[in-house]
Amino acid sequence: MSARARILHVEDDPSLQNLVRAALEHLGGHEVRSAADGQQALDAVRDFVPQLLLLDLDLPGISGIDTLRALRRCEGLQDVPVIFLTAAADPQVFDDLRLLGVQEVLRKPFRPRLLVEAIARVLKEKES
Amino acid sequence: MLQADIARRVAESAPAMLVYLDAELRVRFANSHCYELLGRAPREILGCLLAEMVDPGTLKYALAHLAEVERGNVAPRDYVLLGKDGERRFVQVHAVPDRDPAGRSVGYFACTTDNTATRAARAAASVAEERLSIALSASGAGIWDWDLQGGSVYYSCEFAELLGYGENRLPAEFSFFAEVHDQDREATLGHFADAIQAGGTVDREFRMRCADGGYRWLRGCGRATRDPRTQVVARFAGTVRDISARKVAEGQLQEARALAQATVDGCLEIVDELAERRKLDRVRHELLAAANHEVRTPLASIIAALELLREGVCPPTGQAAEAFLELALQNAERLARVVEEWLDMERIDLGSARLRCEPVDLVALMASVAGEHAALAEEHGVRLEGDPAAEPVWVNADAERLRHALAHLVASAVERSPRGSALRFQLGTREDRVTLLIEDEGCDALSATDLGLGVARAIIERLGGTLCVANRPAVGAAFHVELARLARD
């Protein structure tokens, strides 16, 4: 198991927000900050510098991708690793995300254990 | 006055050439007309032989004539005489023999009239006639010429030929208007009668029966002319030409045009249908994307909750475990609702459903929808506010489906509104449009992939309207429904 990391989780669905937070805290031992949309995420990074971004693609208002672009412009987040969660099935979306430098894309529904493992993998790659 | 003097004066003043030939056919007497006509002096003529006066080519006809006269046939004949400088003069000669008491022929009295001018005119007329004949034959025109006073009728050979009568002869009982097609007769007769009445012209197209019983399209052009003396319309003449080929071509052109129009219409219909289908495809695509999201998100929660319990992240009977189970249950219920929405959509059957459209009072419908949601609003602590319109506002819609769409908008707005906030309805009319605004103060942003919203939009669009959603974070959402207004007294 990798070291404890600071993760910003952006998800508009309250149930999933709670459950992912529980999974990351209890299964991965990470420190999690939750946000329901892009604006909340930008507000959060003022006093919380995440080591990984976990973003929902289908966000209301500012989309997941625009949220990522905005976060990347914030200090210290230029190279932060990113994992996307999405219900979308379009392969084009996956390609677009990879071009944006997104490390992993997980489709909903997903097993929390696999999500935690993916986070560990991405963090390890970042370290090496 | 002496008899001889009288005879001489008669001979000189007669408006003809008088000549006396002796038995040798030598000129013994000629009056002054003779000298004038032939341009010769009397000495050049008197004593001259007939053969010296007549064109050599026609001399034998002159001799034959005199032989006929001798036999008692005194019918006139045409001679060609030679004038001064060999100029040919065409004359008509009446001759009678001069007999002695024994009955022997001793000479001939000849009365000669100059018809050079008449002949030239006749020749000219003949040329003109020939020219007309050629022209008529080339144009295929037939002539009719009605003598309105005498009642006689003339039809040319070409006229008969045009109608297919053999030997270029019309049957004796032929009657112009009787042969005109039943459907054209009255109008044709009317126009011809008008032309005759006014002394004007006519130009009509009509069908006329042919010898074989079939009909041929003709164009008749005629002119009524007045008697110059009485000013009464005395004659009505004109031509007819066969225009069947043109009529057939016109018919074909019309058919081709109709066919082309039908083809264009058909293409436009296909384009419209494709556009409609594309629109439906877009709606389906959006709904499918929405459904995908709406199913996968609660499923993700259910799986996460169950797996966290299995992973033993918390004691199985504690508060935390109950919270996970509650989340799983809520999301299972949410899934059930999604399935319900799908069934609703199936009932709406976006592709082929026949809408039962009728005039619907949007004021009454909206009041009814608000009434149905009063209890839900109270439960959420939301005030429903609307300014009641005094007059009904009519739209052409399927009342049940429109109710379904509006109910979804109201329910979703109530559920997202914070306690103590207001949900406002506003109905407005602008020219031929009706607008319904539903505004909430919901802090939660509207889901971009709300399946119910997709269904509501699909219904409104199928009713020819639009649904715009203004998602205004921190202010609330606004649903803007626009439909065509139905004019009703």
Image (spheres, rainbow, N blue to C red):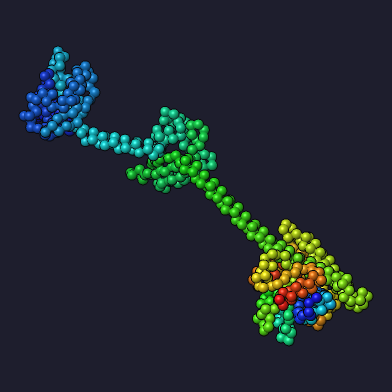
The one of B140 and A44 positioned closer to us in this rendering = A44
Residue pictured at 72% horizontal, 57% vertical: B352
Residue B487 point in image, percent of width and height: 68, 66
Numbered circles on residues, count:
0
* Extreme residue in the front direction: A128
Q: In the image, is B458 to the left or to the right of B155? A: right
The one of B152 and A121 positioned closer to us in this rendering = A121
Residue B11 point in image, percent of width and height: 13, 29
Residue pictured at 37% horizontal, 44% vertical: B225
The one of B448 and A89 positioned closer to us in this rendering = A89
Residue pictured at 40% horizontal, 34% vertical: B158
* Extreme residue in the bottom direction: A47
Q: Which quadrant, please, contains the C terminus of chain B?
A: bottom right
Quarter of the image where one finds residue A18: bottom right
The one of B217 and A54 positioned closer to us in this rendering = A54
Q: In the image, is B152 to the left or to the right of A108? A: left
The answer to whether residue B263 is seen in the rendering is yes
Residue B470 point in image, percent of width and height: 69, 75
Residue A75 point in image, percent of width and height: 67, 84
Quarter of the image where one finds residue A123: bottom right
Residue pictured at 46% horizontal, 37% vertical: B176
Q: Which quadrant, please, contains the N terminus of chain B?
A: top left
* Extreme residue in the top direction: B102
The answer to whether residue B425 is seen in the rendering is no
Q: In the image, is residue B134 above or below residue B325?
A: above
* Extreme residue in the right direction: B317
